[in-house]
Amino acid sequence: MIKKILDTSTLDKDLLKQLDAYIMSLEGDKQEHLIHVLHKAQKLFGYLPQNLQLYVARALNLSGARVNGVVTFYSFFNEKPVGKYTISVCMGTACFVKGADKVLSRVLELTGMNKNEISKDGLFTVKDVRCIGACGLAPVMTINDKVYGKVKPKDVDDIIRHYRSIENESK
Amino acid sequence: MTIFDKLVQLKINDITVTVEKGKTILEAAEKIGVHIPTLCHLNLQDFGVVNKSANCRVCVVEDEDTGRLVPSCAQEVHDGMRIQTDSLKAVMGRRTNLELILSNHPQDCLTCIKNLDCELQSLAYELNIKEIHYQGEKMSHPKDETSFGIIKDTNKCIMCRRCITMCNDIQTVGVLSALKRGFDSVVATAFHLDLNQTSCTYCGQCVSVCPTGALAETNDSPKVWRALNNPNKHVIVQVAPAVRAAIGEEFGYEPGTILTGKVVSGLRRLGFEQVFDTNFGADLTIIEEATELVDRIQNNKTLPMLTSCCPAWVQFIEHQFPELLDVPSSCKSPHEMVGVLAKTYYAQVKNIDPKDIVMVSIMPCTAKKAEAARGELNKDGLSDVDHVITTRELARMFLEASIDFRKLPEDDFDDLLGESTGAAAIFGTTGGVIEAATRTAYEMITGEELKEVNFKQLRGLEGIRQAKVKIKDLELNIGIAHGLGNARKLLEDIRDGKSNFHAIEIMACPGGCIGGGGQPYHHGHTDILLKRQKALYDLDASMPKRKSHQNEMLIKLYKDFLGEPGGHRAHELLHTTYSAKERI
């Protein structure tokens, strides 16, 4: 019996099946597709727990350290569970000089938590990210796939209120 | 394309130099004897390893045409290039870069394990740094002291990535990688696991290239001092083949000077009661291993048989190829054999309670420390080997005891477990174990005397070698690999059923034990390894007996104590088992 440091058998079987199918569908050197595979895994599972990273490493015949290195390099990847809405505030140079730090502090104030945590209502996770390539719209903030450009700290109130109201309506 | 299309002419410090296209400024400068300080750069050309991460920026030189500083270790030359290595801009640039590296480096050099053997320290001296103008935020990572072989002190890491190159590209173990980015970036294991939770083999190749004290061997000398100071303990020591060819470097001897006699007398002065020779264990390993090989060949059992002397390699197969655990020989490694015999045979002869015996091994290796702690080699509360000290640690113990190594007399090993042959001497180099085994297997199979004992086709430094040895009507296919990346290739062939070898020798470290993770630092000078290797072959050639089965104390050991080679008692004491481990 092999001693298990990280148990991959606790991962959801159906989701893993979908991930396997995606990996199977990749052409050429599968190791080259690591980032795509991680995107897919994060989409399926919501985040990338350690045992999932290890699962990906073994599926692509890479070392766990290599995969963990890539996951921790890119701020897009989450090692911890995230809220329903991920608010990413771009801290790239252009956004930063246009006051992204003030936007970030307002977001944190309104959601009442620290970076990379989940808000009490389970709705939000806030991250500061590297340049997302929309410098013309600086400062930029994204909520899941939606982009908000030229955001001022006072705009944040409306935006957050908007997402909260969607949730209240759906209840 | 003519030869001239492949050549590039440039000027370095106004000296014209012509080199091949694709060479770096650093290589061009070396050609004309211009020295450029480097730090992260590492070129082990004999093993095809180059770490060209251009991270540290200590090697910057000035490109006169652009006025810019470029990293000479990575920047390729081009025609008409004009480089200044000693302009004010270049000198100040590399000073600033080094000061920035030092700005968040712990300043505990006095008590650091790498004190006086540290490349960062030497460079600070060389660049005449007397003041650090910047104060950086210090890192505060916990020290990883969980493993039995290697200590990882991340706070001393300068992100040169040499260890990553060794662990991933050469050894293909993949335990270390760069995590995170920017100021937070760090060389670490997956998920910051403790080293002893990973697939680390403890080969120590990361240690042997680390320029600072970020990676080092565990320091076991305090335990040895304690044992030596305990009047109730009978402390015995043994010395591995590769130690005698390297320890001199710590005391200013030319690399490749064999200093067996001085090591033995030095160990007696430290207070060891008996000084045994791991080479005796090597001869014994050959008898057991050759017996096993002949049995496997003649009775159609699992082939190929892989040598099992190298604990890093054993760890590697357990983690990476758990389905192939029937291919390594079941023989314990030589020092474990000497250890178990010290606590049985020697204890019986001298009428000493084995519980009072402390066995210390002097090894070129960090993985031997972890090996000695294996459950399989610690039965009924008795360890075959209690403590393992590397070549470097022994040198430090001599210093600590104010023993003037150069003035030590020559002494001989204690004879019960001290005799050895030339076959054992070459155990410390790649190809040596299998050559020694072949000498004995030949006579076992044919019953005839082997006249030519030098199997030159098994020697060399190629990463993977193969040779055929004719033993009467049997043609023995022999494979040799050193460096775990090379071993992996042979193992994949075995797994896929494509291997037709009878026997394969594997050593984890490039060059074999002469290049072990516990040896004096070569600082990138691989010619040192070649000299150590030559020294071992010369030692073999100088010995009157060159086949393991000619060792008379060994013959006596089988007659008085062990019985038949491969027999019941030999199996009980000299053989071991392996277990599958997780791959992370």
Image (cartoon, grey):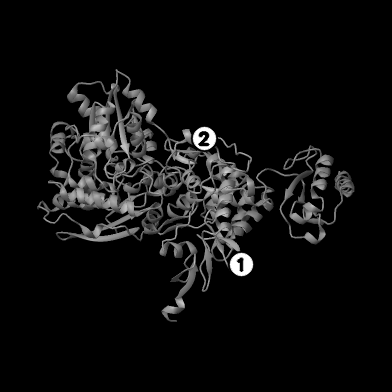
A20 or B354, which is in the foreground? B354
**Horizontal and vertical percent position of residue B197:** 49, 39
Look at the numbered discs 1 and 2 and tell me whether their residues touch, using CB distance below 8 Å. Answer: no
Q: As displayed, is residue A38 above or below residue B408?
A: below
Q: In this rendering, which labeled residue sits more in front, label 1 or label 2?
A: 1
Can residue B565 be seen from the camera position used here? Answer: yes
Say which element carries label 2: loop
**Horizontal and vertical percent position of residue B198:** 49, 42
A158 or A27, which is in the foreground? A158
Query: Residue at label 1?
Result: B66
The chain that hosts pointer 2 is: B
Say which element carries label 1: loop
**Horizontal and vertical percent position of residue B143:** 53, 35
Residue B108 shows which numbered tag? 2
Q: Which residue of the protein is positioned furthest toward the bottom in this rendering?
A: B1
Where the N terminus of chain A falls, by quadrant?
top left
Q: As displayed, is residue B397 above or below residue B315?
A: above
**In the figure, residue B364 lies in which quadrant?**
top left
**Horizontal and vertical percent position of residue B288:** 22, 43
Q: Are marks 1 and 2 on the same chain?
A: yes
Where the C terminus of chain A falls, by quadrant?
top right
